[in-house]
Amino acid sequence: MPAIRKRFSISPQEERLLLAISPATIDRRLKSRKLGLRRRIYGTTRPGSLLKHHIPIKTDSWDVDRPGFTEVDLVSHSGDCAEGDFAHTLNMSDIFSAWVERRCVRGKGQEGVRQAIDDMRVELPFALRGIDSDNGSEFVNHHLWAYCQADPQIQFTRGRPYKKDDNAHIEQKNWTHVRKLLGYGRYDTGMVVNAINELYRYELRWFQNLFQPSLKLLRKVRVGSQLRRKYDAPKTPFERVVESGLGDASKLEEFRRLQARLDPFVLSAIIDRKLHRIWMMRSKAPQPSWLRRGYIPDYLGKPISGEPHRPAPWPALEQYEATLTKEKQLQTW
């Protein structure tokens, strides 16, 4: 109210009315005004907002007995600044077999993500039966919705907003199969996108799906106050697909011949060389827009008159300057 008095010069009678009005009366009096603002705000198409009513939320646990039901997610490669156009890794993990497919796309375009999913679908040694994603507009859009509704139909579900545990399988793979390999650098050129896709399509895919075994959680048993987990024997994703009996016979035979011909130690050495080349292709992240305003450097550079003083500490600025100094010393670009 003190600010209202200074700005609008209201009368004592108007001030009494404002102090006496109830929230319900405020909403009722402003209903037409809010309706006009809502029309102006929501006048353009917002991808995914209406489709969320058609895409069911998956709340039950993954208890599947066949391959083909997957979780998908995007991992950004923006460095320390998420401005501009940069690469993303589209990560797909099968729940039953832990088979992993990835594609690197530039930007988060809806059609580009749909094409990457279709490309991975062709390469899978089993039929794609379902995808489960988060609520990002790169997934919840008409392009992917129409793609899943076409024959053969794909089950399309999503997790709850702000609940990463709903997509726990793919969140784990984001760390172990993407972030631990490519790090947190910025990749934003077409050349590095092609190099990452070459690694994803061949050596890394062969090594992790044909030679890298993993344990699968069977059940949890509570003994007193402790929770004990029971796992099955370690198996590779390829072995789990073969044991299911639901894989594509021709593709599985091709993978079987490939597994007999490849040496995992040679594959590992090739992966290391390609990763080193990709790391050398990192780009310098652009300066954040909040740091390009100009008044901060000007303020720090002004001569001090009178009693010396310093501006209030800004942790974000100090952290950015420390990171910039460290990377300049390391010459990472």
Image: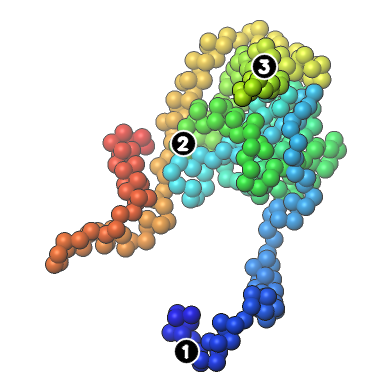
Badge 2, how many Cα within 10 Å: few under 14, some, many 20+? some
Q: Are marks 2 and 3 in contact (CB under 8 Å)?
A: no
The picture quadrant where one finds residue 151 is top right
Q: Is residue 247 left or right of residue 266?
A: right
Q: Which residue is mark 2?
A: 184
Rounded to the nearest angstrom, the CA distance separating label 3 from label 1 is: 72 Å
Q: Are marks 3 and 1 in contact (CB under 8 Å)?
A: no
Q: Nearer the viewer, mark 1 or mark 2?
A: 1
Residue appearing at x 23%, y 58% in the figure: 310
The first of marks 1 and 2 along the sequence is: 1
The three-letter code of the residue at mark 2 reads Tyr
Which x, y percent locates residue 242? 76, 14
Q: Which residue is mark 1?
A: 9
The CA distance from mark 1 to mark 2 is 54 Å
**Which label's residue is closer to the chain start, 2 or 3?**
2
Q: How is the image coloured?
A: rainbow
Residue type, mark 1 in image:
Ser
Q: Quadrant of the C terminus?
A: top left
Pick out the residue farthest to the left: 306
* Place of residue 170 in the rendered image (x, y in percent of width and height, measured from the top left): 63, 32
Which of the 4 image quadrants contains residue 56?
Answer: top right
Q: Nearer the viewer, mark 2 or mark 3?
A: 3
Label at residue 27: none
The crowd level at tag 1 (other Cα within 10 Å; few <14, some 14-19, many 20+) is few
Residue farthest top in this picture: 260
State which tag comes first along the sequence, 3 or 1: 1
Q: Residue at x 60, y 29 (%)?
A: 173
Identity of the amino acid at label 3?
Tyr
**Regarding mark 2 in the picture, which secondary structure is present there?**
loop
Image height of 109 relative to 18, above or below: above
Residue that badge 3 annotates: 231
